[in-house]
């Protein structure tokens, strides 16, 4: 059961939870803003829902709250940072902003972050790059959680890939995992007693199925586009590990902490007006998006939308009416904020 | 019905066909090598099969065989070229190589090519970048040939995206259209009287189907990963048009020549040893690929393969046993080489 909580109340509560975990005022403020914004944008799975697991990881020492990005290499338009297993969100925000600075100087900028922790919602950094006026390309490598195509065991990360376009009338942002549905989404459908709209994995007998519970049981989640999703996932893994000079997916499997611990993240920013004119480029963005949105719909009640447009609508609604949060999750965040929840209580997250 | 023709005979025959179209010795040699290599790698659809359509486009004047890439902008690690509607393959080869040169100087290099023509197989440039020792990222925008998710009419390009890893023991290369199956592939299955392995589009009544003929009829080809494929496709369109300062997809729709005429192509090269050591990076590539390939297979007769590995196997087989080509296509290429085929004969391609 979900309830709506005002953006400011949610952010203040989250901030208190982060302060209770030992974060500084500045760290807690930034993390609370990002987690609340993710829930407000409709990505609860990496917003409020992730605060309990973050607390567990901090208390286990798997997230080093004193870690910050350390410059360990710089060459031309590229920089390499060691995240010191610090707070994933803060490491990633820093690097996304550095990529924009490099792009201002070189037209394109690349920041490769190694040895960091979960950045929560990948789209956070793509949106931020686009809001700064730059095209953003981001990806990550993570531990194995999806079968390679042709395998029946998890053997590659679902390494998300983001591409963001700085349209001033509303950013266009793709934030896609390489699996058709995230595990979090399967749980949402199962709890609601619903089938997935399209097959999302294989059951234990190897049949393609839309039954979320059967997929959770087999752990044979479907790569998006079948072989395409796992092909891109393995290539993104190799590219991230090479560019950042960090762990590849199986190094994370071996360490076994899960949840992206020790991963790499790649931040590329490109000046959209490298060779063109701002006004004409924005006009082209608007014209192209309008044409896509005007494509004849299958169902007139569901007009076509470019990626990011629905997110902006949810963001506006959340700001006006409050942010949706699951009641049980909200109770945990409130307990963390009140300082009366210990690691044992939340160890299942 | 397919036959095998030796690589050298195929290349020489293709070269004669290109010479008969008015290409110079050097142009014909390069185009013949690329088209033959694509067929040898198993991508016949953009190898031999495309030579007749190329001939039509040259004779119509839609491909300007005198066009070459003109530098129209340079900033930091980025360059912009006008392809003058020249030969797509040659324009793209030039730009892929320039991106590598820029990456040598800046760690990362970006070349944005506008106003060009079909580059044939996207993977050509990704393989080339990887063979030069660099990570390659390429994409293109093209005219509308796929419905946006939620629409029943073609409204976005299937804008392919490539990512290549320079593994010295065999490059890892993803070359993916945004549709689950290319139109060319539907034709192959239909002619063979086969159903697609997985649903590839909607029939005229809006049902998801694996019947290739029904999809060709409706033109409602399925985006890879449902909404994911068309979301990424529209973002790639916007990004390519902005960075190259060229046409967006609907500009190409309006001009109406089809087959990528007037499109943009993006070439990004990244030094894989920006911050790491060559030997350790290659060892990581080998270790990661070996682990993926060793993932427990669903069917032991079909072990898991990373993208590019099957291509290299086909390449070796083609070199040893000859390159597969459809008999009817081969007859057309031979007729073009003999100079006894006019535009009317091939206008249907």
Image (spheres, coloured by chain):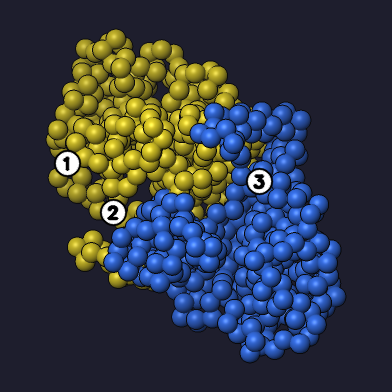
Chain colours: A yellow, B blue
Q: Residue at x 81, y 61 (%)?
A: B6
Counting labels gives: 3
Nearest to the observer: residue A12 or residue A39: A39
In the image shown, does B225 or B301 lie closer to the viewer?
Answer: B301
Q: Is residue A44 visible?
A: no
How far, Cα to Cα, is label 3 from label 2? 40 Å
Q: Which residue is mark 3?
A: B310
Q: Going from the N terminus, do you reach mark 1 or mark 2 first?
A: 2
Q: Quadrant of the C terminus of chain A?
A: top left
The secondary element bearing badge 3 is classed as helix
Circle 2: element type: helix
In the foreground, A103 or B325:
B325
> Which of label 3 and label 1 is nearer to you?
3
Q: Chain of mark 2?
A: A
Classed neighbour count for the residue bearing mark 2: other residues with Cα under 10 Å, few (<14), some (14–19), many (≥20): few
The residue tagged 2 is: A310
Where is mark 1, residue-wise? Answer: A322
Instruction: Mark 3 vs mark 2: tell me if same chain.
Output: no
Residue A332 visible in the shown view: yes
Residue B42 placement: quadrant = bottom right
Marks 3 and 1 share the same chain: no
Are the residues under badges 1 and 2 in a single subunit?
yes
| Chain hosting mark 1 | A
Cα gap from disc 3 to disc 1, whole angstroms? 52 Å
Q: On the rendered image, what quadrant is the N terminus of chain A found in?
A: top left
Residue plotted at (39% across, 67% down): B214
Q: In percent of the image, x 34 and y 19: which residue is there?
A: A55
Residue B70 picture location, percent across and down: 71, 72
Q: Residue at x 43, y 26 (%)?
A: A259
Figure check: B312 above or below B238? above
């Amino acid at each position: 059961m979900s309830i709506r909580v005002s953006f400011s109340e949610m952010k203040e509560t989250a901030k208190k939870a982060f302060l209770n975990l030992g974060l500084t005022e500045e760290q807690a403020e930034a993390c609370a803003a990002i987690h609340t914004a993710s829930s407000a944008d409709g990505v609860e799975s990496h917003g409020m829902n992730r605060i309990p697991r973050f607390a567990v990881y901090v208390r286990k020492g798997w997230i080093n709250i004193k870690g910050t990005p350390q410059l360990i290499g710089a060459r031309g338009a590229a920089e390499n940072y060691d995240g010191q297993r610090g707070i994933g969100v803060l490491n990633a925000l820093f690097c996304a902003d550095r990529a924009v600075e490099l792009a201002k100087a070189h037209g394109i900028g690349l920041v490769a972050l190694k040895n960091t922790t979960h950045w929560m919602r990948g789209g956070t950094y793509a949106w931020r790059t686009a809001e700064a006026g730059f095209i953003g390309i981001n990806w990550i490598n993570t531990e194995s959680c999806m079968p390679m195509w042709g395998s029946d065991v998890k053997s590659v990360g679902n390494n998300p890939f983001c591409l963001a376009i700085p349209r001033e009338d509303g950013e266009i942002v793709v934030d896609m995992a390489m699996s058709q549905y995230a595990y979090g989404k399967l749980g949402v459908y199962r709890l609601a007693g619903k089938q997935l709209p399209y097959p999302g994995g294989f059951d234990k007998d190897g049949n393609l199925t839309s039954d979320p519970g059967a997929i959770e049981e087999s752990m044979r989640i479907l790569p998006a586009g079948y072989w395409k999703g796992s092909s891109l996932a393995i290539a993104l893994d190799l590219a991230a590990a090479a560019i950042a000079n960090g762990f590849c997916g199986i190094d994370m499997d071996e360490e076994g902490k899960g949840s992206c611990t020790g991963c790499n993240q790649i931040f590329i920013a490109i000046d959209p007006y490298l060779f063109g004119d701002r006004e004409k480029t924005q006009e082209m963005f608007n014209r192209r998006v309008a044409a896509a949105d005007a494509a004849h719909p299958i169902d007139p009640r569901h007009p076509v939308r470019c990626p990011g447009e629905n997110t902006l609508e949810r963001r506006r609604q959340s700001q006006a009416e409050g942010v949706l949060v699951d009641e049980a999750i909200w109770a945990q965040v409130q307990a963390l904020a009140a300082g009366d929840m210990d690691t044992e209580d939340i160890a299942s997250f």
